[in-house]
Amino acid sequence: MEEEIEEIIEEEGEGDFREKIKKIREELKVCRKEKEEYLAGWQRAKADFINARKDEEKLRENFLKFAEENLLREFLAIADSLELAIKLRPSEGVEQIYSQLRGLLKKYGVSPIESLGKKFDPLEHEAIEKVEVSEAEREDVVLEELQRGWRLHEKVLRPAKVKVGVLKK
């Protein structure tokens, strides 16, 4: 490399050589700047791709988690009928079927919303009727559950239909 530089100096003179070195240094500076920009752009694109892949995996997990939602809603109608049958005419056979159904629902992440005696929550309860109460501690409390509410994992699948206490004025 040094020999080549010496040859250039002899051929073109020292003044031209300094100009060429200055020009090459400027070109090198531009190349380095472009390299840094390309590297930074590539790193951003790689990070965006990794984040997009993670987001896609989360979406896929949620899709699978809630894919059976419509089917499970239909099972809830059967559960309601079985509960009513047990209340009207309890029999061991019906109770066994209901127990199996509850086990199946639990397997898929469906759980009942406990409402009776709890504070009214519009995200989990649908107030069908308001009942006047004289005690302040029973105000905004679920007094009766008319239809059980259900949750699919952490999401409300169907709110409970309830009667809620309202303080007498």
Image (cartoon, rainbow, N blue to C red):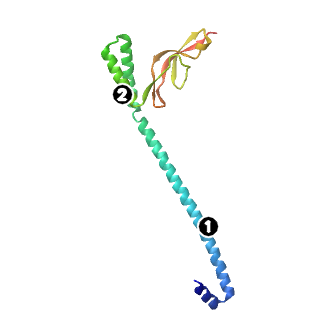
Q: Which sits earlier in the primary sequence, circle 1 or circle 2?
A: 1
Residue at figure coordinates x 38%, y 15% from the top left? 84
Query: Among all residues in the image, which is located at the extreme bottom?
Result: 10
Q: In the shown orientation, is residue 90 left or right of residue 28?
A: left
Element carrying mark 1: helix
Residue at figure coordinates x 36%, y 27% from the top left? 104
Q: In the shown orientation, is residue 33 left or right of residue 95?
A: right
Count residues near mark 2 (Cα–Cα under 10 Å), then give few for <14, some for 14-19, many for 20+.
Answer: some
Residue 158 is situated, as x and y percent measured from the top left of the image, at 46, 25
Label drawn at residue 116: none
Query: Among all residues in the image, which is located at the extreme left?
Result: 93
Can you say which quadrant of the picture contains the N terminus?
bottom right
The three-letter amino acid code for the residue at tag 1 is Lys
Q: In the shown orientation, is residue 11 left or right of residue 124?
A: right
Count residues near mark 1 (Cα–Cα under 10 Å), then give few for <14, some for 14-19, many for 20+.
Answer: few
Question: With respect to residue 36, does 161 lie above or below?
Answer: above
Can you say which quadrant of the picture contains the C terminus?
top right
Residue 138 is situated, as x and y percent measured from the top left of the image, at 58, 13
Query: Among all residues in the image, which is located at the extreme right?
Result: 15
Query: Among all residues in the image, which is located at the extreme top?
Result: 134
Q: Could you say which quadrant of the image residue 64 lies in?
A: top left
The three-letter amino acid code for the residue at tag 2 is Leu
Element carrying mark 2: helix
Q: Which residue is denoted by mark 2 in the rendering?
A: 104
Residue 11 is situated, as x and y percent measured from the top left of the image, at 62, 91
Q: Which residue is denoted by mark 1 in the rendering?
A: 33
Label 1, label 2: how many angstroms apart (C-alpha)? 63 Å
Q: Could you say which quadrant of the image residue 69 lies in?
A: top left
Residue 14 is situated, as x and y percent measured from the top left of the image, at 68, 87
Question: With respect to residue 4, does 51 lie above or below?
Answer: above
